[in-house]
Amino acid sequence: MEFEMPEDLTGLSLAELRDLLAKAEAAFDALTAGVTEDGATVSAAAVEQMRDLNSAADAINTRIGEVEAEDQARADEARALIQARTERGQTVTEPEDTDTGEDEGQEDNDTGDAGDVVAEAEQVTADAAQEALTASNRPAARSFRGLGARRGNNNAGVPPAEQVGFRMRSQIPAFKDGVVGFKEIAASIDAMAVGSRVHANRAPHRKRGTMVPLSLATIDRGFGPTHQFDPQSREEMKAAMDQLVAQTEWRPSQFTDKGALVASGGHCAVPETIYTFCDVTPASGLLTLPAANFGPRGGQRRPVDPDFTELYNTLPFRFTEEELTAVDSNGDPVVTKPCIEIPCTDWEEIYVEAIGLCVTAGILQKRGFPEEIERFLAEVTKAHLIKVSLWSILDMVAVSTPYTIPAAGGIGAAGAFLSGLALRATLIRQQERLPSDAIIEGVCPAYALEVAKADMGFQQGLDVKGVTDAQIDSWLASNNIRMQWVQHWQALPTAAVRWPDHVSALLYPAGAFVQHLENVIEVGALYDKAQLQKNRYTELFTEDEYKVDKRCRVSELVTVSLNASGSVGAREQITVASMTNEVQTITISGSPTGGTWTATFKGDTTYPIAYNATPAKVATELAGLKTIGMGNVAVSGSAGAWAVTFQGLLGATNVPAMTVTGSLSGGTTPSIAVAQTTAGAPN
């Protein structure tokens, strides 16, 4: 089909513009016929024509929108003129005899310029309404004669209330003039069957395809100019609402003669409808983590960090000259210099997850109640931020080692909380071999601050009104702990009437966790043809890559008991538990003349030890075990009767018993055994 785009669209009517748009679409469809089939080819000239037709359709749609806006502006101006006239209350009494043309003309003369203004407004509005109709469907234009401004039929010059409802766009199928309800609009939507052509009547939101920019109807609430305002800010909204309230006449409630209470608006008064919602408070108490980039493929394959426990427990070796030169009965060296084999690296693969939002709404809901859409989207955004924060914390908890600090004999919450966290922070530095002043980061529910302050408020000698969040942060900082106080994790029960008796906190070295959060898909308002047929559309769709990653560092979930009583430790006497190191004795019997033996502790076994090894040699071999470590054991006695004392990290602890296995020769049925000489205490 031939299509020619006029150089100027400003002189065309709505009917001519829509006819031109239909021709452009038909020409485009003719060019694209068969293009989507497999193996189809398209010439460069055809593609260029498709571009021109697409641009032409966009320009025509834009002009249609401009013409409709101009028509609507003229109609609105006409209504405003009539409304202003009626509000001044200049009415004329109509003669009681016949309603002839001469009478009506005389009536216009009596009203002076007012009749001319109203007549002109009627004509302008009628012309605008008539021009907005399609060529095939032309209902009568709306008249303003029913407003009563010319005939003086109003009480006290107040215009009668208009009908409230929807007014359908004239271009849509099954059009009905005047105020309609959902039944008529639903019938129009139903008329848009699959396969029928639906003509756009608004400027396109995006390029062609399945997108059809279509407005079904506009809502007419019957408000006058005093009720119509378009605030550009919250301050303007408040000022406009204050002015509206000030202009409203209020009457106090009163009793009638029959003793019935009458509302201030009068009997059966209809309250004013407002369309604004409560403000959305910003999301707060959210977790903050360093950002990481997982690359364009949404995952990583990386080496697992080696375990250096054996390194620190074994190297460097240490022997005396006597130990190095000693040989057994077979002439073999009694001691062997231990070596650590560098292990082959294991690999791990991690992948991101998909998180997102999908929000849909009704087309009429968007048109008739946009405030609800805006309010809901604000809350959706807030909920999304809170959920991502909570997910991140729970992912951190899942990969952290749990520890529970026992209650400290009724000590108050503040002391127990600070002491328990300081203990585990110290042990994290020890495991990571960090300096004593290295910062340990943490995550804890914000209410723990209030529990600590409440506990301090009960203590004597402290200004109970002077305990602040900053003061508690400074106490933690003095122990080199930096805490994030978050909401929405370990939430308090809504019906709670007392503080909880425990709280959990995450502790980890700085940099142990990073967060990957990258946008993949983000779509605003989307009017899809399939959803349009159901009177729906997509308001928001977003999808993100998400991952909380932990690597190379320890992390702990520390649970601390809370007792917001202000209790402190007894000042009169401090009782210190007895500290006793455990001693286990290894004894060889049967007077062997050769052979070796091994010791096993918590599943880790030593290299073979000579039957007549010195206490120093036995200590070295035991310290080489991953489960013991350097400095955590001392050996005394003599060959064949070694007393092993557990100390250092294993001191004051009732440790498991070692097991020994001998391969001894000579003597009389030689054997080896181990026994606990002294039990460790108090742990």
Image (spheres, rainbow, N blue to C red):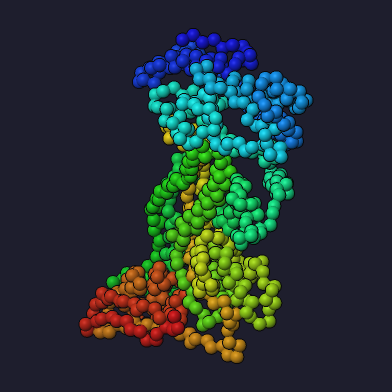
Relative horizontal placement of residue 282, taking residue 597 as reference (left or right): right
Residue 579: x and y in percent read: 48, 85
Q: Residue furthest left?
A: 669
Residue 676: x and y in percent read: 35, 84
**Does residue 256 lie above or below 195 as drawn?**
below
Q: Residue furthest front?
A: 97
- Camera-nearest residue between 247 and 199: 247
- Camera-nearest residue between 601 and 169: 169
**Residue 202 sits in quarter:** top right
- Camera-nearest residue between 226 and 206: 226
In which quadrant will I find the C terminus? bottom left
Residue 19: x and y in percent read: 52, 15
Q: Does residue 321 appear in the picture of this structure?
A: no
Relative horizontal placement of residue 421, taking residue 116 as reference (left or right): left
Q: At x 66% / y 66%, what residue is drawn?
A: 470
Residue 582: x and y in percent read: 41, 83
Relative horizontal placement of residue 212, taking residue 643 as reference (left or right): right
Q: Does residue 94 appear in the picture of this structure?
A: yes
Q: At x 37% / y 86%, what residue is drawn?
A: 677
Q: At x 61% / y 62%, what residue is drawn?
A: 259
**Does residue 578 lie above or below 597 as drawn?**
below
Q: At x 61% / y 49%, what residue is drawn?
A: 269
Q: Residue furthest bottom?
A: 572
**Does residue 650 lie above or below 397 as drawn?**
below
Q: How many marks?
A: 0
- Camera-nearest residue between 405 and 202: 202
